Image: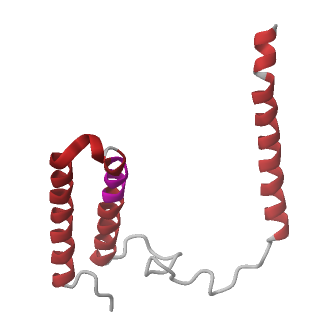
Amino acid sequence: MSMHLEYFGILLFLFFSVILSLLILCFSYLLSAQPAYAEKASAYECGFDAFDDARLKFDVRFYLVAILFIIFDLEISYLFPWAMVLRQLGAFGFWMMMLFLLVLTIGFVYEWVKGALEWE
């Protein structure tokens, strides 16, 4: 019986979190009902109309920006754990990360020189 009492706190927390989430969702839906206007449906970050033909040609620069984001996102995901264990890795681990960063920097400079980061 005592084992069931240990899980009661977790069940209570789960219950209140679900109720609170549903309340917040309902109140935000009720309080923010605003009519749609033309500016809301205009092209924002994607560069094309939101409600248009899906078979239109897509500018390759959007792909380049997405690839750059992925590259630098992966870089950060490798840098944080590396920084946590740098003392155990020693000089070899340090220079391998410098080589990794050099390769990423060369790729970034290449895209910069080619004008992939310029937007018209």
Residue 72 x %, y %: 32, 64
Please provide the residue range marked out in magenta: 75-81
Relative placement, left or right, of 15 versus 72 is: right
| Residue at x 53% of width, y 75% of height | 51
Rendering coords of residue 91 (x, y %): 17, 49
Magenta span contains residue 59: no
List x then y, in percent, for residue 74: 32, 56
The reply, left or right, for residue 6 in relation to residue 102 is: right
- 76 drawn magenta: yes
**Measuring 47% from the left and 78% from the top, which residue is drawn there?**
45
* 54 over 59 or under it: above or below: above
Taking depth in this image into account, of 22 and 41 the one nearest to the observer is 22
Question: Where the N terminus falls, by quadrant?
Answer: top right
Q: Main secondary structure of the magenta part?
A: helix
Name the residue nearer the viewer: 11 or 24: 11
Position in image of residue 96 (x %, y %): 16, 52
14 on left or right of 118: right
Looking at the rendered image, the quarter that the C terminus falls into is bottom left
Front-most of residues 61 and 118: 118
Question: What residue sits 29% from the left and 65% below the top?
Answer: 67
